[in-house]
């Protein structure tokens, strides 16, 4: 909306950048020049707590003198809500200038006012006053008492909570201010539940769930919470618990578990176990079979260990790995009848 006023020397226009679709009904009990004028002919500015709002001020010098301008805002709203931005203070004859009024209310405007006994004020009335001093009077003879009010314009400032439910109403109902404020009551009651449902997946994902939810998620997949694990590693282990269960007792499952703890790469593209960061070599043989072996060449009698495997970790330089915890993982994941050896090869 815009409001235009013209005087002998200055033309003043106000344009709201954010305006309300629903204009409140003027309060007939208000008295005073400011209240009567601004509530009927003023420019309406919508202000959401915590969000900036702007009003454009257009000034034009209609006289033949150069004017030195000064803008002031008077109103019943807190003064810290408004700031004035001007391109300059000198306006040449026939020239135009633009200024901006920046408004911003506290983000917790409604919460702070809940503790007050008085009724909450949402509609404010104000006036922009433009003072000017002709350039030929701006010397020593000019004083604040000689300044002349060249032009003024009123505007209304409406503080409203942002409402999403208005988007579901026909345009006819959006024009009623009471309906928007009435719907906000239900929106504040139901919207937190709706938002929780929209992000429910984040509560059920161990990587993004709150820390208080981790014991529940761990119990859900029967994964023990071990204080020896860091919080980030526990999140990863709970998320991969079903995959670890699926491959428990196999080389793939043991390698995945060690990968989640040590952060060493899986190296799935490397075929040889000797070249992987987590090498697991199985030492299984045919045993003593006379029909397919030659004594003293490719077989021995005694000394063999069936179902035996060797785990070799090759962490990079500076990476610390707890050997006792690695052995705990291997004991937990290997079949009960298997034996193993563990070697830790430090990088250069």
Image (cartoon, rainbow, N blue to C red):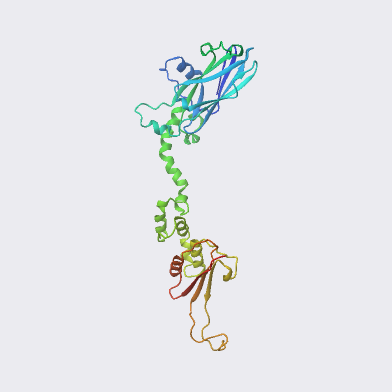
Residue at position x 45%, y 34% in the image: 107
Please say whether residue 175 is visible from this viewpoint.
Answer: no
Q: Residue 335: horizontal and vertical position, in percent?
A: 45, 72
Toward the front, the furthest residue is 140
* Residue 188 coordinates in the image, percent (x, y): 42, 37
Place of residue 149 in the rendered image (x, y in percent of width and height, measured from the top left): 53, 13
Image coords of residue 289 (percent x, y): 53, 87
Which of these two is toward me, 39 or 182? Answer: 39
Q: Quadrant of the N terminus?
A: top right
The number of discs equals 0
Image side of residue 60 versus residue 168, left or right = right
In this rendering, is residue 313 above or below 305? above
Q: Quadrant of residue 190?
A: top left
179 or 32, which is in the foreground?
32
Q: Residue at x 57, y 71 (%)?
A: 274
- Tell me the quarter of the image containing the C terminus: bottom right
Q: Please tell me whether residue 11 is drawn above or below residue 17 in the rendered image.
A: above
Q: Is residue 233 visible?
A: yes
Examine the rendered structure and indicate whether residue 34 appears above or below residue 240: above
């Amino acid at each position: 909306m815009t409001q235009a006023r013209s005087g002998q020397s200055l033309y003043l226009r106000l344009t709201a950048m954010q305006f309300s679709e629903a204009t409140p009904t003027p309060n007939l009990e208000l008295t005073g020049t400011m209240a009567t004028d601004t509530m009927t002919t003023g420019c309406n500015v919508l202000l959401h707590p915590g969000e900036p709002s702007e009003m454009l001020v257009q000034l034009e010098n209609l006289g033949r003198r150069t004017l030195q301008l000064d803008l002031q805002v008077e109103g019943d709203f807190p003064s810290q809500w408004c700031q004035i931005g001007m391109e300059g203070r000198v306006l040449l004859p026939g020239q135009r200038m633009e200024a901006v009024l920046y408004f911003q209310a506290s983000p917790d405007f409604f919460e702070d006012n809940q503790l007050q006994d008085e009724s909450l004020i949402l509609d404010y009335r104000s006036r922009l006053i433009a003072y000017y001093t002709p350039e030929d009077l701006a010397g020593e003879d000019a004083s604040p008492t000689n300044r002349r009010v060249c032009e003024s314009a009123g505007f209304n400032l409406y503080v409203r909570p942002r409402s999403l439910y208005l988007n579901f109403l026909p345009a006819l109902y959006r024009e009623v201010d009471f309906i928007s404020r009435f719907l906000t009551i239900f929106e504040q009651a139901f919207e937190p539940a709706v938002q929780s449902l929209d992000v429910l997946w984040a509560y059920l994902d161990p990587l993004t769930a709150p820390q208080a939810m981790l014991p529940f998620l761990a119990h859900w997949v029967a994964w023990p919470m071990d204080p020896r694990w860091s919080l980030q590693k526990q999140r990863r282990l709970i998320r991969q618990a079903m995959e670890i269960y699926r491959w428990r007792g196999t080389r793939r499952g043991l390698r995945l578990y060690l990968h989640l703890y040590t952060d060493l790469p899986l190296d799935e593209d490397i075929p040889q176990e000797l070249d992987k960061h987590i090498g697991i070599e199985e030492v299984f043989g045919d045993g003593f079979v006379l029909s397919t072996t030659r004594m003293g060449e490719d077989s021995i009698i005694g000394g063999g260990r069936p179902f035996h495997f060797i785990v070799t970790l090759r962490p990079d330089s500076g990476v610390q790995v707890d050997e006792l915890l690695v052995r705990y993982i291997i004991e937990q994941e290997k079949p009960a009848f298997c034996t193993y050896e563990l070697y830790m090869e430090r990088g250069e």
